[in-house]
Amino acid sequence: MSKSSSSYRLTFFQRNSQKIAQAVIITILVLITLPIIVGYVWLIVRSFSEDIVHGFIPTKLTLKNWRFLWQEMKGYPNIWQTTLNTFLLALGVMAIEIAITSMGGYVLSRYDFPGRSAMLKFILVLHAFPAISLMVAIFYVLWNIGLLDKLWGIILLKASLEIPWGSWIMKGFYDGIPWELEWAGLVDGYGRMKVWAKIMLPLVKPGMAVTAIFAFLSGWSEFIFVYTFIFSQKTWTLSRYVMGIIGDYRFADYGLLAAVGLFYVIPSIIFFFFVSKYMIKLTIGGVKG
Amino acid sequence: MPSIRVVNFSKYFGKVKAVDNVSFEVEDGEFVALLGPSGCGKTTTLLTLAGIYKPTAGEIYFGDQLVNDVPPKYRNIGMVFQNYALYPHMSVFENIAFPLRAKKLSKEEITKKVKTVAKKLMIDQLLDRKPMQISGGQQQRVALARALVKEPEILLFDEPLSNLDAKLRMLMRAEIKKLQSDLGITSVYVTHDQAEAMTMASRIAVFSMGKLVQYGTPDEIYDHPKNMFVAAFVGNPPMNFLKDFSVVSEGNSVYLQRGTSKLRLPDSRKGSLPEVVPEKVVVGVRPEDFRIERKEVDNGIPGTVYVLEPLGRDVIVNVRVENHEDEITKIFAEPGETFKPNERVYIVPNLEKVHLFDPETEETIL
Ligand SMILES: Nc1ncnc2c1ncn2[C@@H]1O[C@H](COP(=O)(O)OP(=O)(O)OP(=O)(O)O)[C@@H](O)[C@H]1O
Ligand SMILES: [Mg+2]
């Protein structure tokens, strides 16, 4: 009796090994994220203070840096018009991408059409291909169809660049749904389209949420195409607006820059909170209703 | 209710011949089982009956209507899948109501029909749950309810009981059989469990490697298997095979002889022997068609008791045949008889009931 119980005696470290491991992991994670957290804290503090000394100490609380929200800034477009443009861009890309990838993914997953495997390989290659190298060609195309300097042009451009990869992602979600469910729907008296809409689509909702997040964020944060193909200030988006402030040679107004920057990230944070429950559900390809 | 007629049906997937030139009929209101080992084409046949696959060749008739190109939704069939295929995002109620919604019935009618069928299958307590929140046996009942609620003319089952535990399986076996005979719906039931096929079906179609080997009543299949495959597949424990017997005629009698063992074929059976018999034949004897004796008798084959398998009511005695160490015969002992391992015995086949097979073609000779 006593012999066997003594063999279960553990040292302090053995007894608490799990807690210690946890503490170590948390410490490491904190250290890694610290610069990012510090950056955001600085952004918030700076945007509400008159000036900053020693890099971090705010001098006087003020709302002056946020003046761009209620007064016209000389040399810049109206902020609300710019924000609306950014939303239109992000939501437009999202809507088109969801509509097309939810159907494209289904076809890639379920139909054995000629050229299917070639197409799948091509999508992978395409994804590795930087879109920026297409700049000149894109300019030419947009110019020809009259979508240069138009928000629609950017929306269609972003969506078309992301649809192949998005379809691939959606294909993974459809692949996770057994054929039997589809067959059951057919036997229960529905055509293939109805089965897709009533059975398949609800089951790939997490996939659609993930695609939506990425499409929205990529539209929201798009800069290079807006910078290159949009010339009129009334069509600017927020990323271009921020660039305008950074690139203003007259003086570097860090307070203004911090406030605009913060304003720019708020919607994407809110959006993320809305859809993060789907992100957590996401286990590569696996879908459980 | 229509009958089903399958004529010269084949289904290929690329080079794979999943089903190869199969013909059979299911009569109006009949319960037919498709029986065979894994990969023999049972599911493929069933899915073709459902209209999900199109035949590569051949015709499928419901009644006298050719349905080869009729899509599933116009076939008025109910189907129960092996893993139930319940819609995970719908409640049990919605699952059962789904086929009715396709028919555009009124809300009241749908509720009424779902409640009726749920009550009949004793799942009316579960209507609000999601499929993930009920047990396997309950899921099975929901799948059955979904198949029945639309009052189909044909019911198709794909191994519906294989995911249930043994006790529940026995229970559902009887219940499905009762339900089918009450409703009189023409049914095709796929299974790889011979006991299920024997107990439930009025006729069994035995499949092997995409071919229909034999089609007949359970008794026909059991008593007159067409070849060694059917003989071995149907029955538990399976038929015993004793190899390398020669058929010899002496005077008026015909004997099956191997070494010192000499079995006299009864006069009633020797007439059925074909003119030409292979040099060597395989003798097939079912476990209940052996008698075990302790002393040497006519038609006895010597051996030693190898191991005993008590089953409660019966005991299966495994006897190792002398000079043929690889032949371990399984025999149901007579009630009350007891044997000990390593005991020397003589096993005596009931020669009225032995089967003879050609070892080359594996076809039945007698
Ligand atoms: N969609 C398909 N593509 C290619 N081959 C297939 C397809 N479906 C079935 N097969 C092949 O056809 C053969 C018969 O398959 P089937 O599913 O009908 O077998 P089964 O008798 O139902 O077997 P099990 O008892 O394992 O369900 C198998 O060899 C299988 O690999
Ligand atoms: Mg199968």
Image (cartoon, coloured by chain):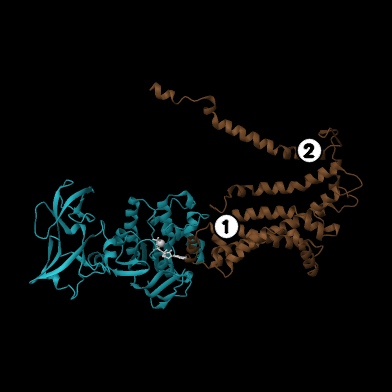
Chain colours: A brown, B cyan
Q: CA distance from mark 2 to mark 1?
A: 41 Å
Out of B70 and B287, give the one closest to the viewer: B287
Q: Position of residue B232 (x, y in %)?
A: 27, 61
For mark 2, name the chain.
Answer: A
**Is B361 left or right of A102, judged from the image as shown?**
left
Q: In which of the image's four quarters is ligand 2 placed?
A: bottom left
Residue B108 visible in the current orientation: no
Q: Position of residue A125 (x, y in %)?
A: 65, 60
CA neighbours of label 2 inside 10 A, class few (<14), some (14 to 19), many (20+)? some
Q: Position of residue B88 (x, y in %)?
A: 51, 54
Q: Which mark is residue A172?
A: 1
For mark 1, name the chain.
Answer: A
Q: Position of residue B237 (x, y in %)?
A: 25, 56
Q: Secondary structure at mark 1?
A: helix
| Whether residue A264 is situated above or below residue A164 in the rendered picture | above
Out of B162 and A248, give the one closest to the viewer: A248
Residue beneath the point at 83% across and 50% down: A243
Q: Amino acid at mark 2?
A: Trp
Residue beneath disc 2: A42
